[in-house]
Amino acid sequence: MVHGAAGHVVAGNEAVEARVIRRLLIANRGEIALRIMRTAHELGIETIAIYGDDEEHARHVLYATEAWRIGEGEGLPYLRIDRILEIAKAAGADAIHPGYGFLSENPRFVHAVEDAGLIFVGPPAHAMEQLGDKINARKIAMDAAVYPVPGTRDAVPTIEEAIKVGEEIGYPIAVKATAGGGGRGFRVAHTAAELPSAYDSARGEADRYFSNSDVFMERYVAKPRHIEVQVFGTADGRVIAFPERECSIQRRHQKLVEETPSPVVTPELRAKLQDAAIRLAKAANYTNVGTFEFLLDENGEFYFMEINARVQVEHTITEMVTGYDIVKEQLRAAQGLPATFESDRLIPNGHAIECRINAEDPADDFRPYPETIHSVVRPIGFGVRVDSSLQSGDTISDKYDSLISKLITWGRDRDEAISRMRRSLIDYEVSDAPTTIPFHLRVLDVAAFQRGETYTTFLETYHDQVFSGLTSPALAAPPDADETEPPTSMLMEVNGHRFDVKVFGVPVVAVASGGTGKARRRKSKAKGAAAKVDNARDVVSPGQGTVLRILVEVGQQVSTGELLCVVESMKMENEVTAPHDGVVAAIGAEPGQSVPRGHVLVSIDA
């Protein structure tokens, strides 16, 4: 802690400085920024939003006490540490909350915040430094008698050494980025023949996303459940363990459905999981919120995977079954105030489920759709919570993920929570973009899900039941009529500081969202720039994105289904394959190039 002491509380043998947060900058966007702001406002804390280009009317910008543009620079605006700190100083912030993603697990950011004399609302930098590296985290876990799946304790630097590890551990084997997370830098080799490709692919992705190509290897558990325990290290030295969450239903290691408690975790197993998480948190001298992730096998044995030193996307379901506002506890801890938890081992009250509603087409391999949503009708009712930042008229940016909202339901038991979720999904209406709602309804209807047989291989096992017969929706053409309607809500920026104004007698212009006037939809750049293609010859980009790799060259013979290139769109890698046998006649893109949907990537002569 740094300046502005107003008193002290005791944390173990150490005095913790108590400080007051009056103005909080949220270094994030979307639903998590809004979720943090709402709790801050309940506590009487003013909020400061930051935003990038084309986000002037974003909901977190409109909701905050005030908002500042991040401005031009390299990379994503929410990763620009220097500019964020400049804004914090100019806006008179006392503290910064990172949310999740972006800079939330970056110890360099934590140090920079504290060096600027501000409070960082989250785990300390030393915890991130210790636990952010998966190899080091495994070593700490083993020292605390919390054991991972059998594997290497250090990075595996060469494919030759990887082959030796495979012979020692056996197959299937997982190759994981040491600095990875969210499924990035993760590959599975089921046989020795698959190992070179898995090793190279994991290292390449790790280098792109984390600037660190180091990988480690461990035995791959074939039918595991993904179980995680939320912990909270308090200012007075306690570690609280929440009820476990199960996040087994995943696609490409990205969570899609989460629930708490797990349908298979008994009170006895819960106690063991919580004890393990508490031991590990204390071994790492962990404070504030974090999530300790485990693999649970079919025999009831659990293995440590990793620690996420931040608030999780799915913290909402934990709040629903415990009644504690986790963000409020974060803000209290950051101010040196005592926690309000009644017990160090919390038990669940009822059952909660979360479905992530994304603007993706499950009938088309979850292709993302960065579109303007003209109408949204959200479900309401007892036991229903919707965390979202999108309203009617808002546009989903192609620069970030495709999340529309997190839909959460609570019930007195699992069956009631499922029934309430099914009703809520049916009530949920989103126009002008495909969503994952039909996918979630299919998942809920699978008998194995209803029985609680939810493994990380669920979607592969029940693929036909979930996906068979799903169709892409027909999207209506947008209205395109000019209108004049005084007054028009507009904005002005003075030195990057955002102000809302009303202008009378001016034609309404097309905006992304917000305002009291009617907004005309901006044309999708992806559609406008799409190339005219010959479907028998040209292979086009499945969505707007960035070309990561081109794996063929002109004159090369290719076969049906052969991988041609990889395009990343909204944080997802899309593998583009050959539709027929032939010879590559032309290549229309290069690695690193940004391409619109429909752009010709490769031309193949039959």
Image (tube, rainbow, N blue to C red):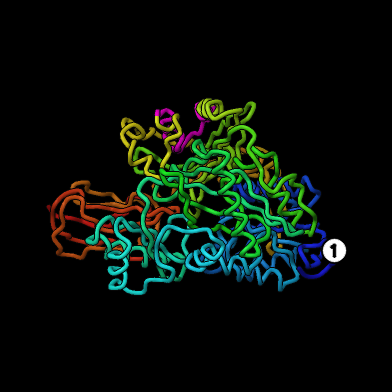
Report x, y in % for residue 335: 78, 59
Kindly identify which residue carries mark 1: 8
From the viewer's side, name the closer residue of 210 and 304: 304
Quadrant in which residue 348 is drawn = top right
Q: Is residue 368 visible?
A: no
The magenta stretch spans residue 29: no
Report x, y in % for residue 30: 59, 49
Which residue is located at x 24 percent, y 56 percent? 563
Quadrant in which residue 378 is drawn = top right
From the viewer's side, name the closer residue of 161 and 69: 161
129 is higher (above) or lower (below) than 187: below
- Left or right of residue 194, residue 109 in this image: right
- The count of marks equals 1
Report x, y in % for residue 446: 40, 30
Which residue is located at x 70 percent, y 58 percent? 25
77 is higher (above) or lower (below) than 108: above
Q: Is residue 177 visible?
A: yes
The magenta stretch spans residue 430: yes
Name the kind of residue labelled 1 in the image.
Answer: His
Report x, y in % for residue 119: 73, 64
Q: Secondary structure at mark 1?
A: strand
From the viewer's side, name the closer residue of 176 and 241: 241
- Left or right of residue 601, residue 327 in this image: right
67 is higher (above) or lower (below) than 395: below
Q: Which residues are magenta?
A: 424-447
Which residue is located at x 53 percent, y 58 percent? 146
Quarter occupied by the N terminus: bottom right
71 is higher (above) or lower (below) than 349: below
Q: Residues within 10 Å of mark 1 (few under 14, many from 20)?
A: some
